[in-house]
Image (cartoon, grey):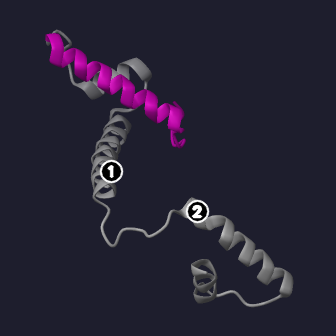
């Protein structure tokens, strides 16, 4: 890989997948010797420091994704009284009408129109 070049998403995924492969091989039979970073370096030619940075970023994102999913499941606050898909056509029609008549649009006026 070229020195100083920003890695694409595909290249990052390749490094992560290679790291997972060697890590799994080491955990299963223990015959794979050497550090995982070194093995990825030998396989792909990516510097070990880059492999370490990408793996650390992957592990950080992986933990963040699970926590966001848990928060989304809990959904705090008052339950919605309507679904977005049900209200969207009314809001769209009201905004088009106001634009055609050159009237100002505020959140309060949209809310009042939707409640009707």
Q: CA distance from mark 1 to mark 2?
A: 25 Å
Residue 104 higher or lower than 2, as above or below: below
Q: In the figure, is residue 97 to the left or right of 18?
A: right
The disc, 1 or 2, on the residue closer to the chain's N-terminal end is 1
Quarter containing the C terminus: bottom right
Residue 113: x %, y % from top left: 64, 82
Q: Residue 22, how many percent across, how many down?
A: 28, 19
Left or right placement of residue 25 versus residue 84 in this view: left
63 above or below 18? Answer: below
Q: Which residue is mark 2?
A: 86
Q: Are marks 1 and 2 in contact (CB under 8 Å)?
A: no
Residue 14 within the segment the image draws in magenta: yes
Residue 91 is tagged as none
Most distant residue in the right direction = 100
Query: Measuring 34% from the left and 43% from the top, which residue is drawn there?
Result: 53
Near-viewer residue (71 or 75) = 75
Circle 1 Cα neighbour tier, 10 Å, few/some/many (<14 / 14–19 / ≥20): few
Tell me which residue sits at (58%, 88%) in the image. 108
Residue assigned mark 1:
69
Considering every residue shown, the one lying at the far front of the view is 116
Outermost residue, left side: 30
Residue 36 percent coordinates (x, y) = 25, 25
Nearer to me, 47 or 106: 106
Task: Please give the name of the residue rendered at 57% of the width and 80% of the height, measured from the top-left corner.
Answer: 115
Q: Which residues are magenta?
A: 1-29
Q: Position of residue 33 (x, y in %)?
A: 19, 14
Assign a secondary structure to mark 2: helix
Q: Secondary structure at mark 1?
A: helix
Question: For the stretch drawn in magenta, what is the main secondary structure?
Answer: helix
For the residue pair 90 and 95, the one nearer the viewer reads as 90
């Amino acid at each position: 890989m070229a020195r100083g070049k920003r890695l694409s998403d595909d290249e990052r995924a390749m490094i992560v997948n290679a790291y997972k492969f060697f890590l799994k091989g080491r955990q299963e039979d223990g015959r794979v010797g050497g550090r995982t970073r070194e093995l990825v370096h030998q396989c792909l030619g990516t510097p070990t420091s880059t492999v370490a940075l990408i793996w650390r970023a992957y592990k950080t994102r992986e933990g963040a994704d699970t926590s966001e999913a848990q928060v989304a499941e809990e959904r705090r606050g008052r339950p919605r009284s309507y679904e977005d898909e049900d209200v969207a056509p009314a809001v769209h029609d009201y905004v088009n009408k106001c634009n055609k008549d050159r009237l100002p649009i505020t959140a309060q006026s949209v809310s009042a129109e939707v409640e009707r």
